[in-house]
Image (tube, rainbow, N blue to C red):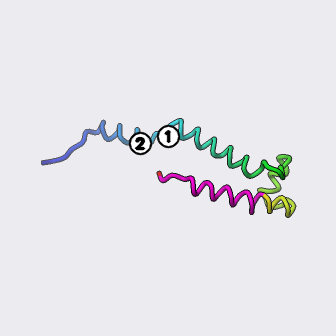
């Protein structure tokens, strides 16, 4: 017995699995917003876009760099890894 699939059923399965659901896009955008808020908002607030740029390029003062990259970023990445769900 030969097992055959029609061309249309294969096309339908591929296109359905390749689609990105709007809910996933919303969750991704919300996650990115929370990542930004976690890194740059807190008791030691990063005050301007220039401060953010200095932090991203590594030219910020030592204290701000420690607060953002060692304290906040490590907590953020731990939360993302622990909360991640396998796809």
Q: Dot 1 lies on which element?
A: loop
Question: Is residue 7 found left or right of 72 in the rendered image?
Answer: left
Q: Main secondary structure of the magenta part?
A: helix
Asked if residue 25 is among those painted magenta in the image, a careful observer would answer no
Q: Quadrant of residue 74?
A: bottom right
The residue positioned 59% from the left and 38% from the top of the image is 26
Q: What residue is disc 2 on?
A: 17
Asked if residue 78 is among those painted magenta in the image, a careful observer would answer yes
Residue sitting nearer the eye, 15 or 79: 79
Question: Is residue 4 found left or right of 67 in the rendered image?
Answer: left
Q: What residue is disc 1 on?
A: 20
Number of numbered labels in the structure image = 2
Q: Position of residue 23 (x, y in %)?
A: 53, 37
Residue lying farthest to the left in this orientation: 1
What label sits on residue 43 in the rendered view?
none
Range of residues picked out in magenta:
68-86
Q: Position of residue 11 (x, y in %)?
A: 35, 39
Question: Is residue 12 found left or right of 23 in the rendered image?
Answer: left
Could you tell me if the residues under marks 1 and 2 are in contact, i.e. CB atoms within 8 Å?
no
Q: Position of residue 85 (x, y in %)?
A: 51, 52
Dot 2: few (<14), some (14–19), or many (≥20) neighbours within 10 Å?
few
Dot 1: few (<14), some (14–19), or many (≥20) neighbours within 10 Å?
few
The residue positioned 73% from the left and 46% from the top of the image is 37
Q: Position of residue 29 (x, y in %)?
A: 63, 41
Q: Dot 2 lies on which element?
A: helix
Real-space Cα separation, disc 1 to disc 2, in angstroms: 8 Å
């Amino acid at each position: 017995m030969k097992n055959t699939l029609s061309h249309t059923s294969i096309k339908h399965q591929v296109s359905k699995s390749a689609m990105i659901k709007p809910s996933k896009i919303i969750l991704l955008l919300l996650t990115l917003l929370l990542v930004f808020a976690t890194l740059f908002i807190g008791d030691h607030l990063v005050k301007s876009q220039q401060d953010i740029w200095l932090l991203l390029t590594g030219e910020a003062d030592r204290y701000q760099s420690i607060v953002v990259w060692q304290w906040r970023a490590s907590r953020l990445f731990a939360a993302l890894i622990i909360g991640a769900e396998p796809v």
